[in-house]
Amino acid sequence: MTATIRTVGIVGAGQMGSGIAHVAALAGYRVELYDISPERIEAGIATVSGNMARQVSSGKLEERARQEALGRIAPARALNDLADADLVIEAATEDETIKRKIFAQLCPILNPEALLATNTSSISITRLAAQTDRPERFIGIHFMNPVPVMKLVELIRGIATEDKTFETARAFVQSLDKTITVAEDFPAFIVNRILLPMINEAIYTLYEGVGSVEAIDTAMRLGANHPMGPLQLADFIGLDTCLSIMQVLYEGLADSKYRPCPLLVKYVEAGWLGRKTGRGFYDYREDPPVPTR
Ligand code: CAA
């Protein structure tokens, strides 16, 4: 734990928010987990419990440590419950309007000294910070999915982020046993600036009929040693998130090379968002999942 942060508020109990709750609770922080309904919070805590159980069964975690960590996660029934947090991490949907609304509700509640962070995977930290009452105590802390497994966290300063905020955020991330990479505040930062155009290109490769879903994923798994094929990874990230990131790149860098593939748009319009909705480039209602094209 760090000296200045003891209680971490997390807004959003989805795959990223629950993953952040998981690693923060294991590192000894008290976690307050908020989402728009009690059911979502309960589902998030159940995910943490299940993923910690995986770590116990593979010998990475003691059952007692799991129980203690779970005991440190409290459901926040209202945003007001985050009033005592030293750091709040917003991990809501990748939609600027939603994030802005959350910050507008949250800022008057928070302790004036509290740090505010966003786990956005692409949106300008400077612009988000400018919507808050504390741009100097605002920072991007970008975790990778699945949070308990992935070693990297990107740290991104906005134009107004103070050194003290950066150093506190750095100490917090290091206390989670993660490796930091510092990125400048440009659309999609480092990981997604490189990863998402590759995924988008894989979708174009499918769209143009160069290969089937299976051919493309096998090619990249075995031909480039990627742990998942790009279409499998797209489903894992969520196709709505992939599309949002491509739109941020396309609009933010004003370069046609980032044009989202029309097939990605079509899947999102169909509500086939990948694993979380049961269908994307694969149909997860079958075991093993079956390609949908
Ligand atoms: N929580 C805890 N442990 C987990 C877990 C989770 N959510 N998911 C997997 N694990 C553990 C498993 O229990 C297993 O542990 P042991 O080795 O101790 O048994 C280990 O991780 C490997 O998992 P699996 O055997 O189930 O499967 P795998 O070997 O195929 O690995 C994977 C799964 C780690 C997800 C791997 O496929 C992988 O690394 N995929 C690529 C992930 C990736 O690229 N993530 C970045 C996405 S981009 C992003 O996140 C940024 C963004 O903003 C969009």
Image (cartoon, rainbow, N blue to C red):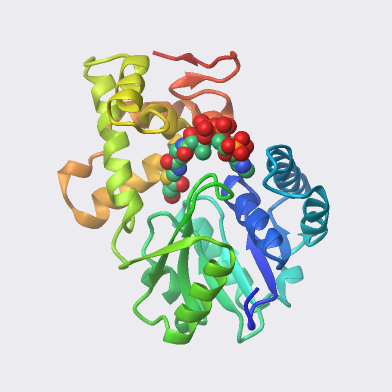
Which residue lies most toward the front here? 59
Give 246 or 25, whichever is nearer the viewer: 25
The residue at the point 70 percent across, 59 percent down is 26
The residue at the point 55 percent across, 50 percent down is 147
The residue at the point 27 percent across, 37 percent down is 198
25 with respect to 179 (left or right) = right
Give 60 or 75, whichever is nearer the viewer: 60
Q: Is residue 108 visible to us here?
A: yes
Compared with 121, 1 (above or below) is below
202 with respect to 276 (left or right) = left
282 with respect to 190 (left or right) = right
Q: Quadrant of residue 215?
A: top left
| Residue 275 on image: x %, y % | 54, 29
Compared with 208, 79 (above or below) is below
Counting labels gives: 0
| Residue 59 on image: x %, y % | 70, 42
The residue at the point 62 percent across, 46 percent down is 14
| Residue 265 on image: x %, y % | 36, 32
Give 7 or 254, whichever is nearer the viewer: 7
Q: Is residue 77 visible to us here?
A: no
Give 164 or 64, whichever is nearer the viewer: 64
| Residue 226 on image: x %, y % | 36, 33
